[in-house]
Amino acid sequence: MSLRHFAKRYMFFVLRAGFRLTPMSGAARDRCRQYFLDRHADLLPPGPRGQTDVTAPVKRRPRLHAAGRAIGHVARRKGPLPEPLPATLVAFYLPQFHPIPENDAWWGEGFTEWRNVTRALPQFEGHAQPRLPADLGFYDLRVPDVMRRQMQLAREYGIGAFCTYFYWFAGKTLLEAPLRQWLNDPSLDLPLCLCWANENWSRRWDGRATDILIGQQHSAADDLAFIEYIACYLADPRYLRVDGKPLLLLYRPGLLSDPKATVARWREWCRNHGIGEIHLAYVQSFDRIDPRDIGFDAAVEFPPNSPTPKLITARQQLINPDYHGDVHDWRENVRQSVTQSEPAYPRYPGVNPGWDNEPRRSGRGAVFAHASPRGYRDWLRHAIAIATRRFPTQPLVFINAWNEWAEGAVLEPDIRLGHAWLEATRQALAPVPVPDLRPCAVIHIWYPDLLDELVGALRSSGIPWRIIITTASEQEQVVRKRAAKLHLDAEIEVFENRGRDILPFLHVANRLLDEGVVTVLKLHGKRSTHREDGDAWRNELLDKLLAPERASRILEAFADDPTLGIVHAEGHLQPLHYYWGENQANVDYLCRRAGIPAPEAMSDSFVAGSMFWLRPAALRMLLDAHLEVLDFEAEAAQLDGTLAHAVERMFSLCATANGFTTKSAASLTGQEEGRTISSYPYAQRSG
């Protein structure tokens, strides 16, 4: 560390300690913090750096293109919404998707936010950039049909209103064309409300007082000019109202010299000019004060601008060795939100589907890793419950955001996950589904003649199975004919021949988790043609997992013990370090992607043979990593070292990280464990 760098860090920590010890009100503290950041942001010490091991033996995802689908991709589909909706979901809406003369001058002719979006590059392994739009494409908001399609999509998935940013600079407005379009076209019937983004526009995209492109000029006269100008919106019958009052948001009240006086002017003007009473809320982007102290009615929670989770940058394997951004754990942001004490003052809850502003800050972006539609769904459910309890007459929940593409906060469909975020929104509005207790067998078939044997074992178990067969397109017709000959009532899903039995299983397990399935038996037509004892290996696994006297007891154990995650055939749980070899780098990568602790090779184990019982919830962290299909190597008869082999070693690790146990079938059925670990005959140990 250089002397200059050390001095900067020392000065910052001394100043921060003094600031924390100084007694002052919350409003004063917010103002001081904003003043410091506006003028001395260069004193902020840089965070930890990621790993730059250029000797790493494995290059992960092939750099083919950025349009690959991931596990968890959801197509657009119709679905029911409860009547009435439990809350009004209000999504923040960015209008910066059409060119304006000012942006032409500042950023180059034809500039829109899409230019930032498409220039983004992945900075570390697993960094999903660029994030590209799907159904709506690279739209231009000058085209009236774009907003119509956005509103149709929003309604279909339960969004009740857009809260659109409004850009006013002492009489000059920017990016207002989409709003005027809404105002002049009654058929655009989704309610809107305005959020005045009352900060400077800077070249750094952070609203601070440096590199200003266009600045604010707050004054008493400007207060009145602003409210008069937006009155046409407030008066529109489609405008979002709270208890009959138009809802107006302010982004940063701390930038006003006297917020209380501004509010008084607005309220008086509206009373005198036919608008009536208005409902005022401020966004907790920078300020954290009781809204009533400054004349507002409520605050709006605005993640991720909340207590910042600890950095996990140091754990990332950098693609760009010059990356100087910060990586946080989005899940920790959620935990902080759901466990915080509710304030004594009125505050509408807010949630966030992710954050990654790398497109705006090349090589220096702030990334919240491990965001997932399922995590967002659960967070949104929690927020809806808070809103209905605290605001029973008109519960509102704010979502940041509908289309902040350059900040990675997006509900609109993207190429990687499709409509997954919107589907999660719809699920959050509905009651939590009842668990599906029917046991499900998932069978992967590459060798169709083995289907008879596997189905026979399932039928002999005496359990009424729901059966799902996965296969490759090359074998589809043969498998369908074989299933028909067996009079098998099975769901057959066809995938590319990639990732062996593992990738198809992850696709299916992801769906079963959303369906509430509790118990799954994973099987595959294991022939292991490179071994002479491949049939013996398969038969032993089937016998220990599916013998009638065992299968029913295992099923009961899953019902009796909610912490039971995986049940393996005894003698087939092997230490990681016995078969570490070519898999170590890939397992480390998967642990970083899933956000679970690094494995301890000398003490952690994995289920060899890739057949076992499991609870889909035990795999949630792995499924929520949303690995892409292209992460898995093309099939080339590999015997080891592929990502599929690494995922095989992740199942028990993931179950443990999710709080579930891994047990043997023998331990659940009161039988001897049998073979010792050191005498495993079906694989050769490696260093």
Image (cartoon, helix red, strand yellow):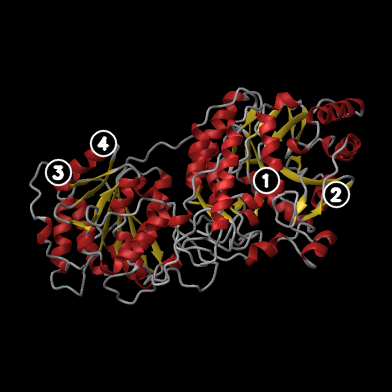
Distance (Cα) linking label 4 and label 1: 52 Å
Residue found 44% across the figure and 54% down from its top: 625
Q: Which residue is mark 1?
A: 37
Camera-nearest residue between 236 and 93: 93
Query: Residue at horizontal 50%, vertical 57%?
Result: 73
Disc with the residue nearer the chain's start (4 vs 3):
4
Q: Residue pushed farthest bottom?
A: 636
Quarter of the rendering containing residue 133: bottom right
- The amino acid type found where label 2 is placed reads Thr
Q: Give the CA separation, mark 3 to mark 1.
A: 59 Å
> Relative to the observer, which residue lies in front, 25 or 495?
25
Q: Cα distance, mark 3 to mark 2? A: 70 Å
x, y (%) of residue 450? 22, 66
Residue drawn 51% across the image and 55% down it:
74
Point out the tag, 3 or 2, that comes first from the N-terminus. Answer: 2
Taking the image as drawn, is residue 78 in sight? no
Q: CA distance from mark 2 to mark 1?
A: 26 Å
Which of label 4 and label 1 is nearer to you? 1
Out of 154 and 304, give the one closest to the viewer.
304
Q: CA distance from mark 4 to mark 3?
A: 14 Å
Q: Please say whether residue 617 is visible from this viewpoint.
A: yes
- N-terminal of the pair, mark 4 or mark 2, is 2
Circle 3 Cα neighbour tier, 10 Å, few/some/many (<14 / 14–19 / ≥20): some
